[in-house]
Amino acid sequence: MKAATLSVGFIALTDAAPLIAAQEMGFAAEEGIELDLIRAPSWSSLRDMLVFGRIEAAHMLSPVPVASAMGLGGTGAPISAVAVLSVNGTVIGVSNEMAARLAGVGHDFAFNDARAAGAALIAAKDPARPLRIGVPFPFSMHAELLYYWLSALGLPAPQSVSIHTVPPPLMAQAIAAGEIDAFCVGEPWGSITVENGAGALLLPGKAIWQFAPEKVLAVRTDWAENEDALLGRLIRALWRAGRWLAQPASRSLAAEILSAPDYLNLPAEVLDRALTGRLTISSRGEMRDVPGFIGFHRGTANFPWRSQAEWIALQLAARTGLDRDRAIRAGRTAFRSDLYRTALAGTEADMPGASLKVEGGVQTETSIASEAGRLSLLPDQFFDGRIFEPYTP
């Protein structure tokens, strides 16, 4: 039987790896599908390609489906997040000028203390103007982490922070040109900034929220409802790709595959940094190890927790002035744990007993109730120790 072809869009980022590995390592073929992977230049173009039917599925920022459900962003068609492709994997970087200012206020670039790094950034900013920070898209985990982090430390937006939208591949250029003071971006574009001598890395996004859902598999909601069999094949292929990527023995080959011209078109050595969590943070060659820098499978990494969608909705509502209860109710519908469970029923995948959980309360790896008894939650604390309770009507 001829394989069904699905057009799937992606951005040139390390966390597109599950889609690329699904095609290149044969996991898609095992499900009787072929992925026509289409590289998009920006998140806005990728979202539009999905909404207008140019592609069937997309590598997508986790807040985009939530924003869509809340009526933000003018997407025009409901979008569902049917699986999480990756957790964490982002970095916060600064210009060389800002790095010098940070050193001047005594910051040690330890790369593991969000409170200390944020306090130093606030102390080092130019008092005459807002801190200019680049993010890949207004509705992104990058933006939500920055707003959460800096607001908690006393630097609220928009009064003191000016957020600029910059596509990931252009982030190094923007900071080299002096258009922004800092950025939050997915790898390898932070490392590319260091390679180009344009800036230094200050902090992994993981230091702000230890288990942030970063990218999701997004589809139009009507397509999910009409093509449930194809959707199931796609989710299963990506689940197996994520499991393969999570194995340390897969990293070198994964970096080689991702480096190909049709995918990221970058040196495998640079891509390997994100996959191993061993990052070069400055042009002087300083290294930092970040265990679990990016997650593709361990714990419940791929499960679209509705409580994660609720947290994103609350952050979006807080900065856009929408009614918070209404936003949470709408936002939670965007993470389709029901479709994920259906797609993986009868496979070796284990499922949690619930689809909501407390966010931020897990300090050490913890076993949870699941269908097969093999699941655990990985640490998921916020840097300031706050806890997010699932919404109760």
Image: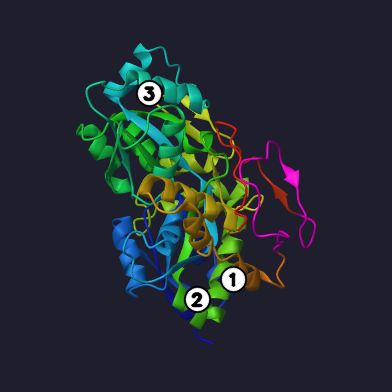
Q: Is residue 228 above or below residue 246?
A: below
Range of residues picked out in magenta: 349-374
Observer-nearest residue: 159 or 58?
159
In the image, what residue occupies the spot 71% across and 59% down?
Answer: 352
Observer-nearest residue: 197 or 373?
373
In this view, the residue farthest toward the right is 373
Is residue 357 a member of the stretch shown in magenta? yes
Residue 337 screen position, x and y as percent: 60, 65
Which mark is on residue 121?
3
Q: How is the image coloured?
A: rainbow
Q: Residues within 10 Å of mark 3 (few under 14, many from 20)?
A: many
| Residue type indicated by callout 1 | Leu
Q: Residues within 10 Å of mark 1 (few under 14, many from 20)?
A: many
Provide the residue designation for mark 2. 224
Q: CA distance from mark 2 to mark 1?
A: 8 Å
Asked whether, in this view, residue 326 is left or right of residue 172, the answer is right
Q: CA distance from mark 2 to mark 3?
A: 43 Å
Q: Quadrant of the C terminus?
A: bottom right
SS label for mark 1:
helix
Is there CB contact under 8 Å for labels 2 and 1? Answer: yes
Q: Quadrant of residue 175?
A: top left
Q: Residues within 10 Å of mark 2 (few under 14, many from 20)?
A: many
Which mark is on residue 339?
1
SS label for mark 3:
helix
- Asked if residue 101 shows in the view, the reply is yes
Q: CA distance from mark 1 to mark 3?
A: 42 Å
| Residue type indicated by callout 2 | Ala
Asked whether, in this view, residue 41 is left or right of residue 222, the answer is left
Is there CB contact under 8 Å for labels 1 and 3? Answer: no
In the image, what residue occupies the spot 48% across and 43% down?
Answer: 89
SS label for mark 2:
helix
